[in-house]
Amino acid sequence: MDISQLIADRAAADVYTCDVNDRVRQVVAMLAEKRIGALPVMQGDQLAGIFSERDLIYRMAEEGAACLEKPVGEVMTAPAITVESTSTVIEALGMMTRRRIRHLPVIESGTMCGFISIGDLVKSRMDEIANEAEAMRNYIQTA
């Protein structure tokens, strides 16, 4: 399965994002409110980076609470590691494992069209394995 199939029923407009000029405090509040671990950071309609819980932890360790008043554009991870919509779930999982990340903006024709988490990919893979097992059971029963 490729990533475009995984996000086909999601509208790009439904992806939560923040702006490079938003204060870290605001973005942290959004992460908590939405119960999510990361947000794509936008500059206009372009992906500028990604802000995750890890970015916050690293900055808090370095600067303390002062980092909460900075623009998120100063503390985000940039450039964001992305995945093409034509990539497979296995390719995306491999990239996340190698890079030790849990979220990927999905890019199509240079524009962000979705946002996926490792949980999305694992669920997709588990569903695929369950379907293959069921097909195998049906095959064996009819053979």
Image (tube, helix red, strand yellow):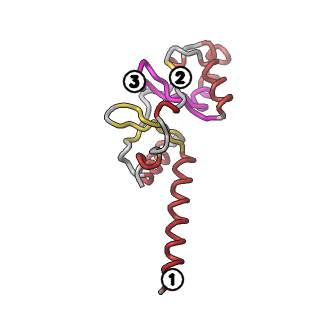
The residue to which callout 3 is attached is 46
Residue 79 lies, with reference to residue 128, above or below; the image says: above
**Cβ atoms at labels 2 and 3 below 8 Å apart:** no
Q: Residue at x 50, y 29 (%)?
A: 40
Direction bottom: furthest residue: 143
Q: Is 52 one of the magenta-colored residues?
A: yes
The residue to which callout 2 is attached is 18
**Cβ atoms at labels 1 and 3 below 8 Å apart:** no
Picture quadrant of residue 85:
top left
**Which of the two discs, 2 and 1, sits closer to the camera?**
1
Nearer to us in this view, 101 or 62: 101
Q: Residue at x 57, y 47 (%)?
A: 119
Where is the N terminus found, in terms of image quarters?
bottom left
Give the mark nearest the N terminus, 1 or 3.
3
Q: Work out how far the residue at label 2 is from the one at label 1, CA to CA, in angstroms.
A: 51 Å
Residue 109 is left or right of residue 98, and the answer is left
Element on which disc 1 rests: helix
Magenta-drawn segment? 36-58
Identified by mark 2, the residue type is Cys
| Residue 80 locus on image (x, y percent) | 44, 31
Identified by mark 1, the residue type is Ile
Mark 3: give few (<14), some (14-19) or many (20+) Cα within 10 Å. Answer: few
Which label belongs to residue 59?
none
Q: Residue at x 44, y 48 (%)?
A: 92
Q: Work out how far the residue at label 1 is from the one at label 3, CA to CA, in angstroms.
A: 51 Å
**Which of the two discs, 1 and 3, sits closer to the camera?**
1
Identified by mark 3, the residue type is Gln
Element on which disc 3 rests: strand
The residue to which callout 1 is attached is 140
Mark 2: give few (<14), some (14-19) or many (20+) Cα within 10 Å. Answer: many
Q: Is 48 one of the magenta-colored residues?
A: yes
